[in-house]
Image: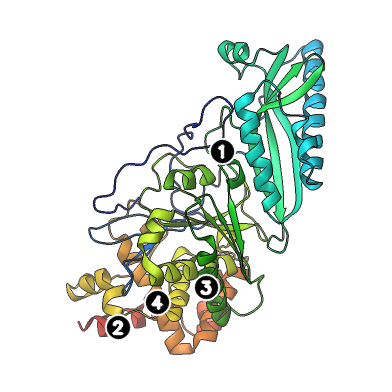
Amino acid sequence: MSRLTGAGEQRGAEVIDEHADTVPLPAVPPPGGRKGPGPVPPIARKVALALAVCLIAGGGYAGLRRVADAPADPNGPASHTTQTTATPDQAGEGVRRAVAGEAVLQKMTDAVENDNREEFFDVIDPQATAFRTSARTIFANLSRLPIGSFQLRYVSDDTAALSEDRQAELGAGQAWLAQVEVSWQLAGFDAKPARETLPVTFVTRDGTTYAASFSERLVSGQRRPIWALGAIDVAKGEHSLVISLDSEADAKGYVSVADRAVESVTKVWGKGWRQKVIVYLPAKQAQMEAVLGATPNTYTQIAAVTMAELDTPEAGAPVRIVANPKLFEELGKQGRRIVLTHETTHVASTATASPVPLWLAEGFADYVAFTAVPVQDESAAKELFKAVRAGKGPAELPSTEAFAASATDLPQAYESAWLACRLIAEREGQSKLVKFYRTVHASRSTTGLADAFTSVLGMTEPEFVAEWQKYLKRLAGG
């Protein structure tokens, strides 16, 4: 991913755990290029007037602040069932574990929905002292959120997952680890519930089953709900909800920026979307990676990420903008507005579940952001103009591979995409650019992009590319 000059190494993400303050995140490779519909990878770009601009997929150079909107690994498991051959006795034990575990989860669900703290703690292991402290924070967090629905569902278990030492530490008659699906919907913001899979440790003492952990044995790529990472503050605006893990952060200040971003996007995209955004503000970059289910330090140089909070992105999925607060703060007021407008464009256009090519998704998001906060072409397209003046301008629209984190000319890919979209708006009008995007997005055909070029813009892609190349030369003065 992109780097910032002089940036230090971050420690692993801190998550709530019953027998230690921190638990390292599982190693999972950073997201790569996109194939067909899927989440939006990281973006990167320079910003004039602020200290930075947006980058969506890594690649860095000295002196620039970088921003991204890459989601978590879309291949993260929805469930983790271990398939083995079981004897009738073993199968019966499995059923008994599932029944006991599901009963605990149902009581916790009811307690959250009824805001009944005492009922919630009735099913927390009385001997798991550290976890009971964590559970108090979790329950308080859920009480602060505008929960419209909440559910915990037993999915599978693995009797061999807990080591002998861990079994002895728990000191229970029976203990096991289960994978539990948690879903929650934020009233007024989510059309569908968010869903993640949590590892939950259960223990049975004197015939009573309790929950003893929410964070043991994370599976590779497994994400963590923000409300399970520490105490949160919540601020609500007209169009936005900011959920902050940083007690020193002014969540209300971010609400005003997010509200303006929604208004800016609506001016271009139209009112036909929910006009709501949710911003997660972790206390540190490592917590951001916990929310995303990413390898520690993957996002050290990334300031913001857009993700669908489902195991499989789909239309209507709850989408979050996840900020790396340190880098986000370094962007400055104007840079933060550009970044949030870019990210909000992805939310409005459902980019995390869209078949549009990356050059169109990222170029359009930049077009909207730079329309809201104008910047000088020479600053925003510096690397591209250098290449054009050297006779090395792009021969075609940026490919999916051009947006990979390891791509050599990543800044040029984003700058090229932005100016391609701006050319469409200048040539045909902004409404035609929006129509072009919507037409490609709605197409179910493999020729959707080519069809949109002819039906909406009245030209073929090669004809557009030729005109775009002339446009870049004119702008670069080459």
The answer to whether marks 3 and 1 mark residues whose Cβ atoms lie closer than 8 Å is: no
Residue projecting furthest to the left? 390
**Circle 4: residue type:** Ala
Q: Which of marks 2 and 1 is nearer the N terminus?
A: 1
Mark carried by residue 261: 3
Q: Is mark 3 on a helix, strand or loop?
A: helix
**Left or right: 139 with respect to 451?**
right
In the rendering, at what x and y percent does residue 151 appear? 76, 43
**Circle 2: residue type:** Lys
In the rendering, at what x and y percent does residue 92 appear? 82, 16
Q: Which of 270 and 8 is in front in this view?
A: 8
Mark 3 or 1: the one toward you: 3
Q: What element carries label 4?
A: helix
In three-dimensional space, the C-alpha distance between marks 4 and 3, rounded to whole angstroms, equals 22 Å
In three-dimensional space, the C-alpha distance between marks 4 and 2, rounded to whole angstroms, equals 11 Å
Q: Earlier in the sequence, mark 4 or mark 2?
A: 4
Mark carried by residue 420: 4
Q: Earlier in the sequence, mark 4 or mark 3?
A: 3
In three-dimensional space, the C-alpha distance between marks 3 and 1, rounded to whole angstroms, equals 30 Å
Residue at left 43%, top 55%? Answer: 325
Residue at left 60%, top 41%? Answer: 228
Q: Is mark 1 on a helix, strand or loop?
A: loop
Mark 4 or 2: the one toward you: 4
Residue at left 57%, top 62%? Answer: 354
**Circle 3: residue type:** Ala
In the rendering, at what x and y percent does residue 396 appear? 35, 70
Mark carried by residue 222: 1
What residue would you read off at disc 2? 470
Residue 95 occupies which quadrant of the picture?
A: top right
Q: Is residue 271 visible?
A: yes
In three-dimensional space, the C-alpha distance between marks 3 and 2, rounded to whole angstroms, equals 32 Å
Q: Which of marks 3 and 2 is nearer the N terminus?
A: 3
